[in-house]
Amino acid sequence: MTTFDDRQRAQEAKFARDDDLRFRAEARRNRLLGQWAAQLLGKSGDEASQYAMSVVTTDFDEPGDEDVLRKLLADLQGKANEVEIRGKMAELRQTAREQIEAEG
């Protein structure tokens, strides 16, 4: 085995770890976003948890954040606008990433 092969395997492993981290952070961000939105909607307990999970599953509809954004815009009419939702998405993306990295 050559050094090149070792380096290539290491890069492939890093890519797989980074991809897994990105997926887990996005799912965590969406759950946190759903909890935030549930609070704005006056939901609590199991109802808030179910709503948060609906936000997570919405993200599987299409690549990117637009599917989640559309759901939240529709659900939060009069409670939060697009700028507020996008700002919260960015904030919680960072929070989720930090939480996932802290877990190891």
Image (spheres, rainbow, N blue to C red):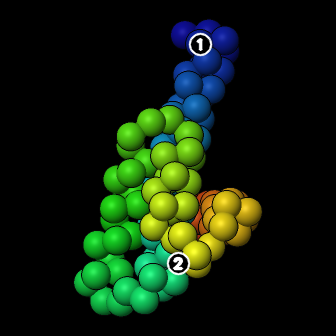
Question: Taking 23 as reference, is 96 above or below it?
Answer: below
| Rendering coords of residue 61 (x, y %) | 38, 40
Viewed as shown, does residue 7 lie left or right of 26? Answer: right
Regarding residue 94, the answer to whether it shows in the image is no
Q: Residue at x 61, y 18 (%)?
A: 8
| Rendering coords of residue 22 (x, y %) | 56, 46
Secondary structure beneath dot 2 equals: helix
Question: Taking 22 as reference, is 82 above or below it?
Answer: below
Query: Quick one: label 1, few (<14), some, or many (20+) residues within 10 Å?
Result: few
Q: Amino acid at mark 2?
A: Trp
Q: Amino acid at mark 1?
A: Asp
Q: Quadrant of residue 94?
A: bottom right
Q: Residue at x 58, y 65 (%)?
A: 96
Residue receiving disc 1: 5
Viewed as shown, does residue 93 lie left or right of 28? Answer: right
Q: CA distance from mark 1 to mark 2?
A: 46 Å
Which label's residue is closer to the chain start, 1 or 2? 1
Secondary structure beneath dot 1 equals: helix
Query: Quick one: label 2, few (<14), some, or many (20+) residues within 10 Å?
Result: some
Q: Quadrant of the N terminus?
A: top right
Regarding residue 75, the answer to whether it shows in the image is yes
The disc placed on residue 58 is none
Q: Residue at x 34, y 71 (%)?
A: 51
Residue receiving disc 2: 36
Between 8 and 81, the one lying in front of the other is 81
Outermost residue toward the front in this view = 78
| Rendering coords of residue 87 (x, y %) | 72, 65
Viewed as shown, does residue 43 lie left or right of 96? Answer: left
| Rendering coords of residue 69 (x, y %) | 55, 54
Between 89 and 103, the one lying in front of the other is 89
Q: Quadrant of residue 53?
A: bottom left
Q: Nearer the viewer, mark 1 or mark 2?
A: 2
